[in-house]
Image (cartoon, coloured by chain):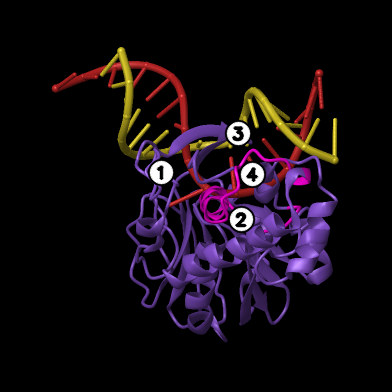
Chain colours: A purple, B yellow, C red
DNA sequence: AGCACCACCTGTGGGC
DNA sequence: TGCCCACAGGTGGTGC
């Protein structure tokens, strides 16, 4: 479900709501949701800790506590939402509830059960346990020069697969990758070594623009995504190619769907070369 | 190194 | 109309 913009929208919304809140004992409906440490230790250790701020790296939400860090990855259908009162939550996919000592709570719902949470002691553990294979945040940690240097090391890769590789740079997912490649007019199956310097600059600008637009419009709700208040995103109506197989591109050609890097891939055969 | 394939889960929608 | 299966915003492991 969520790519960088959706996670960022949730981060911005949750941070002011959660700052200085103190966790009570969690309720783990599906203990497997806890990736680290054990569910028992997670529950015992989280209680009593306070939220300092919320950061993000790629698609990971990083909730900094007065001791340690609570990391969340929503994977395909995960959804975090904040409930101000202590009312029971009616949600058949509720996986865990993290109540605060003021009666409010942070809930994690996830239809497909792929989402995970980690509680680590410090940044060393965060890096070695959670972010082992996660590269620099593609929106916040890279300038155009950095990006081109990273590309230079990946001459053999195909563009779509590379942009989806979180180890290369973190944050792009299937929707924003297709949209970004449409915006810069580059075919998703192109090899990195075929790109001109101008192509690379356009690509970098398109990445920034498409992610910024995604955030600006509250994320993309293709099926399940909701922000932390339960509202839908608004970027789906602005998608140029994703989910638009056989629809007409603004150039008049029909948008095609194929499979690249194992993922459904939409592109305009006329605009993208 | 890069890629294809499967696994993890549950739901849905397009095609027959 | 109803059934079935391919596919869905992600990632980790395996094996070529």
Q: Nearer the viewer, residue A238 or A140?
A: A238
**Looking at the rendering, in which quadrant would you find the C terminus of chain A?**
top right
Q: Are marks 1 and 2 in contact (CB under 8 Å)?
A: no
Instruction: Please give the name of the residue rendered at 81% of the width and 45% of the height, measured from the top-left corner.
Output: A155
- Which corner quadrant of the image does residue A221 belong to? bottom left
- Checking the image for residue A89, the label placed there is none
How busy is the neighbourhood of tag 4: few (under 14 within 10 Å), some, or many (20 plus)? many
Quickly name the residue at label 1. A243
Magenta highlight range? A167-193
Disc 1 or 3, which lies upstream in sequence? 1
Disc 1 or 4, which lies upstream in sequence? 4
Instruction: Please give the name of the residue rendered at 70% of the width and 59% of the height, measured from the top-left corner.
Output: A198
Q: Are marks 1 and 3 in contact (CB under 8 Å)?
A: no
Q: Is residue A13 above or below residue A98?
A: below
Quickly name the residue at label 2. A172
Pointer 3 chain? A
Secondary structure category for the residue under label 1 = loop
Disc 2 or 3, which lies upstream in sequence? 2
Quickly name the residue at label 3. A262
Q: Position of residue A193 (x, y in %)?
A: 78, 44
Secondary structure category for the residue under label 4 = helix
Disc 2 to disc 3, C-alpha distance: 15 Å
Pointer 1 chain? A
- Checking the image for residue A160, the label placed there is 4
């Amino acid at each position: 479900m969520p790519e960088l913009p959706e996670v960022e929208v949730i981060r911005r919304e949750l941070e002011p709501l959660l700052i200085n809140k103190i966790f009570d004992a969690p309720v783990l409906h599906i203990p497997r949701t806890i990736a680290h440490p054990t569910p028992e230790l997670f529950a015992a250790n989280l209680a009593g800790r306070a939220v300092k701020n919320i950061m993000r790296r790629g698609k990971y939400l990083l909730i900094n506590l007065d001791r340690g860090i609570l990391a969340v990855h929503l994977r395909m259908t995960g959804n975090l939402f904040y409930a101000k009162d202590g009312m029971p939550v009616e949600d058949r996919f509720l996986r865990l509830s993290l109540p605060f000592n003021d009666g409010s709570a942070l809930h994690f719902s996830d239809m497909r059960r792929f989402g995970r949470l980690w509680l680590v002691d410090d940044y060393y553990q965060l890096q070695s346990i959670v972010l082992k294979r996660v590269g620099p945040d593609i929106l916040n940690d890279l300038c155009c020069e950095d990006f081109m240097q990273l590309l230079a090391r990946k001459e053999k890769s195909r563009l779509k697969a590379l942009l989806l590789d979180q180890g290369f740079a973190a944050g792009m997912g299937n929707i924003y990758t297709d949209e970004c490649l449409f915006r810069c007019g580059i075919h998703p199956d192109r090899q990195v070594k075929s790109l001109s310097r101008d192509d690379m600059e356009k690509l970098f600008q398109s990445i920034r623009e498409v992610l910024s637009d995604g955030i600006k419009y509250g994320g993309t709700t293709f099926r399940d995504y909701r922000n932390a208040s339960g509202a839908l995103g608004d970027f789906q109506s602005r998608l140029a190619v994703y989910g638009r197989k056989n629809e007409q591109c603004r150039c008049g050609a029909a948008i095609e769907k194929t499979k690249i890097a194992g993922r459904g891939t939409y592109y305009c055969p006329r605009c993208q070369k």
